Amino acid sequence: LCVFAFLKEMLDCSEYGNGSCTENERSVGVRAAMYVFLAGAIFITVFGNLAMIISISYFKQLHTPTNLLILSMAATDFLLGFTIMPYSMIRSVENCWYFGLTFCKIHYSFDLMLSITSIFHLCSVAIDRFYAICYPLHYSTKMTVPVIRRLLLLCWSIPGAFAFAVVFSEAYADGIEGYDILVACSSSCPVMFNKLWGTTLFMAGFFTPGSVMVGIYGKIFAVSRKHARVINNLPENQNNQMRKDKKAAKTLGIVMGIFLLCWFPCFFTILLDPFLNFSTPAVLFDTLTWFGYFNSTCNPLIYGFFYPWFRRALKYILLGKIFSSHFHNINLFSQKETE
């Protein structure tokens, strides 16, 4: 930090900003509206995903390998809403980063880690659904709780190591002319990826796992169509299980699709920006980042819409019934439900 303070004194920062926050061009009314909207999104993200975490953790009927993956994914979304989005909200509304260079790196490291962790979770869910739909007889032996735990370890450790190593080493900025001056003079927590790391991030953190997910779900739905032709000839219990698995795959496929839709513009812009001489407007980057954040807001809404058991669990949580003894054994599924 002392080095950057020295640079700020010695360099002409007029081209990049003087390191202090300039007067906000937005009116008070516009800023207030932005705060209300973004705070509402943060509220839904935090408490919606917290409700999912409590539901799966508390109710024994929900203790399944698939739900363990969903629980961990909800924890990822919760952490994004609780630790990342509030600071990003202030930066976006005020057009200034008030929290210093070191915390800027910590904030961006967690931001990057949680984003990649989410897509790794979705890959794991796709693998889980692949075995449940395509190889139902082997599912219980392939997707055991120890296997899920190993998948979760990979989902958290690889993105964490990648994000913190790249950000704190500043390898992402190697060869970017004027980057040191920009960091010393700017008040906006600038992070710019060079061609190598922009491409690496897009390929390893988004495109490759995204392609794997799309391929797996393509296979799942192809098999589901075959199952639909013979489903009426199966015994009732096997029929119901196949319907449940199909509905779960459909719901989680929607979650995957919304994730790809929300995060693709941001990752694609990171890929293109160094090839366009970093000409992408900061406000566009900021908007696309928030578009990605809103994915974490959407997930609990999707679960609430497609999963009746989540709506029931949420009602019990809000009514405080989870504090009653033995209530964790309650049946959350009606007889007519297939999920």
Image (cartoon, rainbow, N blue to C red):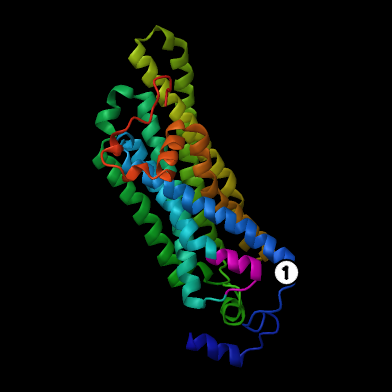
Q: Quadrant of residue 31?
A: bottom right
Near mark 1 (Cα within 10 A), the count class, few <14, some 14-19 or many ≥20, is few
Image vertical order of residue 1 relative to residue 30, above or below = below
- Percent across and percent down for residue 133 are 39, 25
Q: Which residues are magenta?
A: 87-97
Residue sitting farthest toward the top:
233
Of the pair 196 and 59, the residue shown nearer to us: 59
For this rendering, which residue is in front, 251 or 303? 303
| Residue 270 in sight | no
Callout 1 secondary element: helix
| Residue drawn where x is 61% and y is 77% of the image | 187
Locate the C terminus and report the quarter of the image it occupies.
Answer: top left
> Mark 1 belongs to which amino acid?
Val
Residue at image location 40% in from the left, 26% down from the top: 245
Quarter of the image for residue 325 reads top left
Which of the 4 quarters of the picture holds residue 328? top left
**For this view, does 139 lie left or right of residue 171?**
left
Q: Residue 253, how many percent across, how many down?
A: 50, 34
Q: Is residue 259 rendered magenta in the image?
A: no
Residue 89 part of the magenta segment: yes
Q: Is residue 85 at least partly visible in the picture?
A: yes
Q: Is residue 39 placed above or below 176 in the rendered structure?
A: above
Q: Which residue is mark 1?
A: 28
Residue, x 46% and y 31% (percent of image)? 308
- Determine the residue positioned at 59% across, 44% down: 261
**Residue 255: image location, x then y, percent:** 51, 39
Q: Is residue 111 above or below residue 154?
A: below
- The picture places residue 19, in percent across and down from the top left corner, at 62, 82
**Is the magenta region chiefly helix, strand or loop?**
helix
